[in-house]
Image (spheres, rainbow, N blue to C red):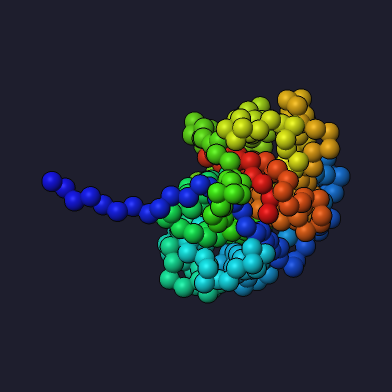
Amino acid sequence: MSPRLLTTAARPGARILGTGSYLPERVVTNDELALTIDTNDQWIRERVGIVSRHKCAPGETLVDISAHAGRAAIADAGLQPGDIDAVIVATCTPPSPVPNMAAQVATAIGTGDIAAFDLNTACAGFCYSTAVATDMVRAGTATNVLVIGAEKFTDWIDPNDRSTAIIFADGAGAAVVGPCTEEQGPAIGPVSWGSSGDQHAVIQIRDRTTFVEQEGQAVFRWATTKVAPVALRALELAGLTPADVDVLVPHQANLRILESLAKAMRKAGAREDMVLARDIVHTGNTSAASVPLALDHLRRDGLAHSGQVALLVGFGAGLSFAAQAVVLP
């Protein structure tokens, strides 16, 4: 007879305990880009809605910006680094595939020798990682999971490619996912996620010697038709309706895509006073970092409040997509 194995004690659910973010100091305006590539401020604003973006300073690494955001999230949660027992870094721009970023970030923050791993679903990475962290907490595998979305596109963008150089930027955002009590109830809903691998080539880095390539029109058509049903499914799984959403935090890909999603949500019943994150205007597209960056900025700016329902929606290269409803800390 096989021995009976013990398992960890399950918990009723998980919640976001705190958020944090970090943007490099250097700001690159549209006018600055126009000095080196064939573009101008009006052209960029009309097509993607970006006014400025942040770039890492020479020597500033992906680990550095991840650690800054992670420390801020831990402090916002009222915890210490030693209270974290797992770190997930969502990124698609590591300087190399080995070693992973998460173990280095955990050491930089001072968490000790804890579980740490990277997750790459590009722009959907933070939502994917939040779903994994939620299941880890619910299953008792971890107590407090630090989830970081971080990108340093400076290393992977051709500065002379107008289709990408105007869009992608650097930054990091983070959240601590921890357990809820029976009285509180779950504050992170089930994830609605998936992938469309048949369209993997519309956003890609072909090999280690190339830069990011993007078929902008193909991505736009896909995002404006396929993402809204994913977001609505997340609400359905959580037992909510569009009218329950106070704050909509989509991946900051393109301002026209964001406004199209908000329009679709309102057509499905979302309120006119639903707040839409528009971080892209001053941060550009930071891929896996964009959702946590936008969420933290909304909280810091007083546009999102404790107890409100936020709908997080990630989508991008893969093509990958994920969404979940959360109650804000």
Residue at 64%, 30% in the rendered image: 232
Q: Position of residue 27 (x, y in %)?
A: 77, 62
Q: Position of residue 106 (x, y in %)?
A: 51, 68
Residue at 48%, 53% in the rendered image: 137
Q: Is residue 213 visible?
A: no
> Left of 74 or right of it: where is 10?
left
> Left of 114 or right of it: where is 246?
right
Q: Position of residue 245 (x, y in %)?
A: 73, 37
- Give the image quarter of residue 241: top right
Residue at 56%, 67% in the rendered image: 63
Q: Position of residue 292 (x, y in %)?
A: 66, 53
User: Does 228 appear above or below 139?
Assistant: above
User: Does 104 appear above or below 319?
Assistant: below
| Identity of the residue furthest to the right in this view | 42
Residue at 61%, 53% in the rendered image: 16
Q: Is residue 86 visible?
A: yes
